[in-house]
Every structure is written in C-alpha cells, then in structure tokens.
Amino acid sequence: MQTSQTPRRLAVRLMYAATAGLFTVATGVALHAQQPLPVNSAAPETINFLAEAKAPVDLSTPDLNYSSSAASSDLSSAAPDSAAAERFNLSPEGASSDTQPPPRRRYGRPRYQDRGHNADGSNRYTFEAGAGFTTPTGATGKRTDLSYSFKAGAGINFNRKFGVMAEYNYDHFGITGGTLTSQTNVFNTLYGTLTNPTTGTTTNFDGLDGNAHVWSLTLNPTYTFHEGDKTSAYVVVGGGFYRKITNFTLPTVSVGYSYFYGPYEYVANQTLENYSNNAGGINGGIGFTYKASRFAGERFFAEARYVEVFNSASTNSVNSDYPPSNARTGYFPVTVGIRF
C-alpha cells in the first residue's frame, strides 16, 4: 500500500513546483512593464494635422527643410540644394532667363522646311489646266466670231500672295458671215473659177469658209489680294509671244478608193489660203478660286482676261488677198479649270 502511493505524491509535488515557477515569471514581467520611463528620455512629439493643413503656404520662398515636423528630421539635417532652390524660386526678384522656362509660343500657320512648300505652308509649285470661250472685241470682233479656248500652265509660288505662271494658250475664232461674203467676192474677182486637176471639175468660191486662231506662250505674275478658308481672288498681268493664223477653206471634190467599192468621190474642206502673223502682246485680268475644304490642295478657278496682240504688217500679210490678217487683235478669253 505504501509503495503504490509514492509515484502519486511525486507527481503532485512536480505540478506544484511548475505552477509556482510560472507564477514567478508572470509576476516579474508585470513588475518590469510598470516601471516609469527614465527622467532624461524625451517623449515623442505629436503632430497636429489640422493645424498643419490650415497653415498658409508661401510658394515664393518654399521651405525645403521641413524642420517643423519630427518625421522629416532626416531632411532638415541635410543641406538644401541651391540649384533646386533657384529653379523653384518663382518670385520676380529670383527669376532669370537661364533658369525660367521659355515664354509661351504663339501658334500661327505651320512652317514647312521641305522643297515642295513655302515657309507659310503654300505649295511652291503649281500646275493648271482649263478651257472656256473667247470673245473678240473691237475691230477683231467685226471680222471674227466667239469660239472656244483652252490653256495649260506651270509656275512657282513665292508665298501665298505672289506667284508667276508660264502658260500656253490656244484661242480659236470663227469668221463672220460678212467677212466670208466680202472675201468670196475678192476671190471670184481675182481668180474666177477653179479647176480640179484630179477630177477636171470647175468650181467657184461660193462655198468659202474660214477660221482663225491665236496661240501664245506667256509669263504671267499673279497677286492674291483676298484669301479665305475656301475662296480667294487674284489679279494677273503678263505678256509674251503670240502667233495669229487665219485660214480660208473651200469644199473640194476629191477621189478616194475602197477595197470593196473601188474609186469614189467625196467632198472635203481644203485650205485655200493661209495667213500668219507673229507679234508680242500683253494680257491682264481677274480670277477667283474655290476649294472643297480648307485642307484641300486642289482649287477650281474661273478667270477673265483681256488680251491685246500688237500685230503689224508683214510680207505675208501685206501682199496677201486678206490684208486684215495683219491687224491688231483684241479679245476676252474666259476660262474655268483646276489648279493644284
């Protein structure tokens, strides 16, 4: 009986000893936590965020040290960057051309550097093509009728306002009925009837017809006095070389040959007489342009000019059967077309 109780007593004693040790450790920790702070240790400084937010901000001389906050004590101990302080000094006294940003740029028309454009953005090179009608005036209008014209040109623009265009113009005219009647009488008086050497038939000049035209190579400066987003207006003057040609034709019976039908006769106008005259001349007028959008490079144009050709007497015209071929020529060409 005594032997069986010895282990039990031993276990109870060990449990009492462990409980006493744990109590001793807990008591020591609690007493250490309740000890007061040393007298010479500084309590951490509290930050009043509401006061900091209400404080005024001075942007003219920013404080880079932040000495008012204990949290930034590392920054306050460092020396300020003098270059940064000067860069951020926005006051008029501290501003300088070296440290301040450049003034605001004024944006206008784009400036180009390529060969196809001028500095103001206009196309440096230009081309045109157009067609229309020509109205003779003065003495020219008494001998010729309104007819068609066309032209083509290429040039260079020095800027949006001023350019020079080299042009080829062809202006066609009909011969008035009164001129044809008068010239028919002249030919009948001088030559009577004509005999066709091929067919042996004779004919007079009652079917006389004719036409005239002037072709020219000119150099024409232009000046744009109005320019909008889509429309513009310009004036043009110029001059150059003009060649005037007058043709009189007569219907003539000729003989043709067909593989299936053999020889046959047909009537065709053949040139009876031809007169030419070379001279200088001038022109001037006004034109208008229109483009579909402000960014388009192509423009439609319509212009009217007056042309004066200083035709004078030549051997061909003085000794001819039609002396008016050397008379001065004046006409109004009206043209519409495209320019790009």
Image: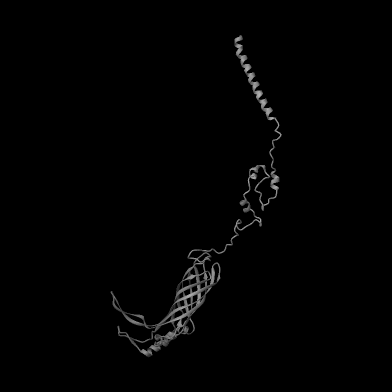
Quarter occupied by residue 252:
bottom left
| Image coordinates for residue 212, horizontal then vertical, percent | 42, 81
* Residue at x 67%, y 42% (from the top left corner): 70
Residue 187 in the image, given as x and y percentages of width and height: 38, 88
Task: Answer yes or no: is residue 240 visible.
Answer: yes
Q: The N terminus appears in which quarter of the rendering?
A: top right
Determine whether, in the image, residue 159 is placed left or right of residue 1: left
Number of marks present in the image shown: 0
Q: Is residue 39 above or below residue 52?
A: above
Q: Which colour scheme is used?
A: one colour
Q: Please identify the residue farthest to the top as the structure is shown.
A: 1
User: Which residue shows up at 46% across the image and 78% down it?
Assistant: 240
- Depth check, front residue: 39 or 292: 39
Return the x and y of residue 272 as percentages of the image width and height: 37, 83
**Residue 50 image offset from top left, x and y in percent:** 70, 45
Front-most of residues 250 and 283: 283
The answer to whether residue 192 is above or below residue 60 is below
Asked whether 44 or 133 is in front, the reply is 44
Q: Is residue 292 visible in the rendered structure shown here?
A: no
On screen, residue 270 versus residue 83, left or right, reads left
Question: In the figure, is residue 16 to the left or right of 212?
Answer: right
Q: Is residue 317 above or below residue 52?
A: below
